[in-house]
Amino acid sequence: MIVRRRVRVWGAVQGVFFRASCRDEAVSRGVAGWVRNRPDGSVEAVFEGEPGAVEAMTVWCRRGPGGARVDGVEAADEPPEGLEGFRITG
């Protein structure tokens, strides 16, 4: 079973390797999707994969990489689209 979740992360999350670390974490868990910086200073990501792996990515987003300060996370499940690979966009 494949699930999809969209996550938005607020705080000091840009310029601290959040996107690259997120990609590495997702690839290591076999999760597909993408991550990008938003103009408002937040980071947005979409994860598709096994439910446990997607949940692990959501938990990871609550702390982020070592240099990040996460102030808030919003997550919403969506219908899977069959994404392959994980990429950094925008």
Image (cartoon, helix red, strand yellow):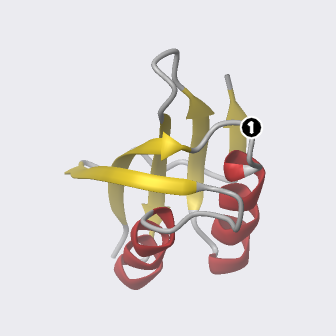
Q: Residue at x 77, y 49 (%)?
A: 17
Q: Residues within 10 Å of mark 1 (few under 14, many from 20)?
A: few
Q: Residue furthest bottom?
A: 52
Specify whether 86 is left or right of 8.
right
Among the 4 quarters of the image, the one containing residue 87: top right
Local SS, label 1: loop
Q: Is residue 87 positioned above or below 2 on the image?
A: above
Q: x%, y% of residue 78?
A: 24, 47
Name the foreground residue: 66 vs 51.
66
Residue 80 in sight here = no
Q: Residue at x 65, y 58 (%)?
A: 22
Q: Residue furthest top?
A: 39
Numbered label tally: 1
Residue 75 in sight here = yes
Q: Is residue 85 positioned above or below 57 on the image?
A: above
Among the 4 quarters of the image, the one containing residue 59: bottom left
Q: Quadrant of the C terminus?
A: top right
Type of residue at label 1?
Answer: Gly
Q: Quadrant of the N terminus?
A: bottom left
Q: Residue at x 68, y 29 (%)?
A: 89
Specify whether 29 is left or right of 16.
left
Q: Residue at x 67, y 51 (%)?
A: 18
Name the foreground residue: 67 vs 39.
67
Q: x%, y% of residue 47?
A: 47, 56
Q: Disc 1 designates what residue? A: 15
Q: x%, y% of residue 6?
A: 35, 46
Q: x%, y% of residue 31?
A: 57, 66
